[in-house]
Amino acid sequence: MPNRRDVLAQLKIVLDEITEIKTVVRVYLEAEFDITQYAQADLPLIAIPEPAEETDEEMTSQRSLMALATKLVVYFIDWAVDPDATKYETLVKKIRDKIGANFTLNDKATEARVMSVSSVLGTMPIYNFVVGMEMKYYLNEAAT
């Protein structure tokens, strides 16, 4: 049975497969994540903050459906005052397509869905946007 670590590790592995993304990291405190520790060669970069977790109310026998709500913070470089919409749209599409093509995260989750995408934030040259995600997996209560 998968646990939250398995689901998050698999999310990182799936996102690492996107050739346009150079770096994918997991972070445990958003405050400790510092984009300046990465070189331009490491961008675009996806930071996966540790998500909130709650039990979904659907229960079957001894299994609880756990829901992980997380966000992907995607950093990219653009040397224009107004970032290029093509770069942003390409990254969004690649992330959505990769999650959509593997919505069970290699069978570690029952589903992984993109719930929202923010507008572009930041200042030249480092911009970012946030992809809201929800992942669900079954927890075997008899084994915990």
Image (cartoon, helix red, strand yellow):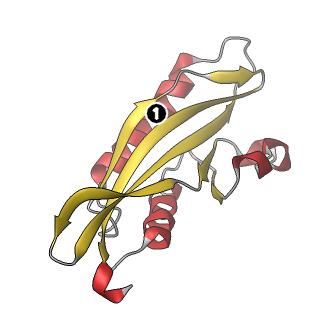
For residue 136, which quarter of the picture? bottom left
Please say if 68 is above or below 108. above
Viewer-nearest residue: 57 or 10 = 57
Residue placed at 50% from the left, 71% from the top?
A: 5
Label 1, residues with CA under 10 Å away: few <14, some 14-19, many ≥20: some
Query: Does dot 1 land on a helix, a strand or a loop?
Result: helix
* Residue drawn where x is 79% and y is 51% of the image: 32
User: At which x and y percent is residue 122?
Assistant: 71, 24
Q: Nearer the viewer, residue 28 or 142?
A: 142
Of 74 and 77, the residue lying toward us: 74
Residue named by callout 1: 92
The image shows residue 89, relative to residue 53, as above or below, that is: above
Relative to 74, 131 lies left or right: left
In the rendered image, the vertical position of residue 28 relative to residue 143, given as above or below: above
Give the residue furthest to the left.
61
Quadrant showing the N terminus:
bottom left
Task: Indicate the amino acid at tag 1.
Answer: Val
Residue plotted at (47% across, 30% down): 90
